[in-house]
Image: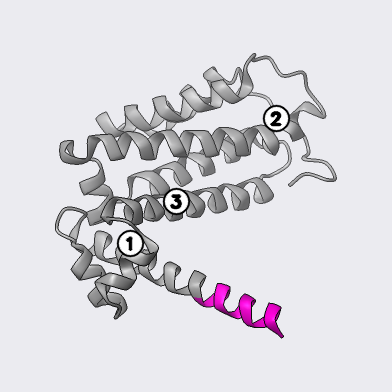
Amino acid sequence: MEDKHCMTREEQTAARRDAIVEAARQLYEEQGLSRTSVRDITNRVGVTRTLFYHYFPDKEAVTSAVLDNYIEDFIEALRIWNAERRTGDIEHALTSVVKILRLGLFEHDAFRLSLASRENAALYLEFVNRVADRIASYMVNTTVRDYERFHEIKINHVYETFYLLTIGIVGYVRRHPDVDDEVIKDLIAQTLHMDRGTTLPDKGPGSE
């Protein structure tokens, strides 16, 4: 009985924390980061400031948790992309992953716009580095591993390559938002030594 009661309290604690993070995310998207206060967040959730500070030491901490939520959403989109990759279709893989990059990282809600402002430059850099780390780790452990079943990888330092590729693409698209998708696809293909005239292998059994 004690273990069950303890688990129930843990679930309640997790749910309350998640509610605070979700409220912060909604407010950031509605009115931006700088215009949202801790009081706004607590009012949205319906909790006291004391309870907020029980879960988060300050606004920066809840903002970090919001960034983690965005990154998890992006990685989930990559999981779906990986599961739906068409056997042997490099063009489809490139086209769909560029779409994910644009929607996941450059959607023009108030939070993303404020995140990309000079005022939040340090936070934006942290966000991009976290995204690059998660993308690189995910690709190395899934898509690249599948590719290795059929082809010799032509690049060294695979994790580092995906990490730098992500940072480079994000930085370039941020500076040149109107860049054609074909350019982005070429940059990805060239960096990874992929021939857009050839095909990707079947993912094979056991891929994630």
Q: Residues within 10 Å of mark 3 (few under 14, many from 20)?
A: some
Query: Which residue is rendered at x = 51% and y = 77% of the image?
Result: 12
Q: Is residue 71 left or right of residue 20?
A: right
Res. 39 in view? yes
Q: Residue furthest front?
A: 2
Q: Nearer the viewer, mark 1 or mark 2?
A: 1
Q: Earlier in the sequence, mark 2 or mark 3?
A: 3
Distance, label 1 to label 2, CA atoms, is: 40 Å
Query: Which residue is rendered at x = 66% and y = 50% of the image?
Result: 84
Q: Which mark is residue 25?
A: 1
Q: Residue furthest bottom?
A: 1
Q: Secondary structure at mark 2?
A: loop
The rendered magenta stretch, by its main secondary structure, is classed as helix
Q: Is residue 8 above or below residue 174?
A: below
Reading the image, the residue beneath label 2 is 199
Amino acid type at circle 2 is Thr
Amino acid type at circle 1 is Arg
Q: Nearer the viewer, residue 1 or 45?
A: 1
Q: What is the tally of numbered marks visible in this picture?
A: 3
Q: Residues within 10 Å of mark 1 (few under 14, many from 20)?
A: many
Indicate yes or no whether the magenta region holds residue 8.
Answer: yes
Distance, label 1 to label 3, CA atoms, is: 11 Å
Q: Position of residue 140 (x, y in %)?
A: 66, 32
Query: Which residue is rendered at x = 44% and y = 42% of the image?
Result: 101
Reading the image, the residue beneath label 3 is 68
Q: Earlier in the sequence, mark 1 or mark 3?
A: 1
Q: Earlier in the sequence, mark 1 or mark 2?
A: 1
Q: Quadrant of the N terminus?
A: bottom right
Q: Is residue 148 above or below residue 61?
A: above
Q: Nearer the viewer, residue 115 or 175?
A: 115
Query: Which residue is rendered at x = 83% and y = 45% of the image?
Result: 206
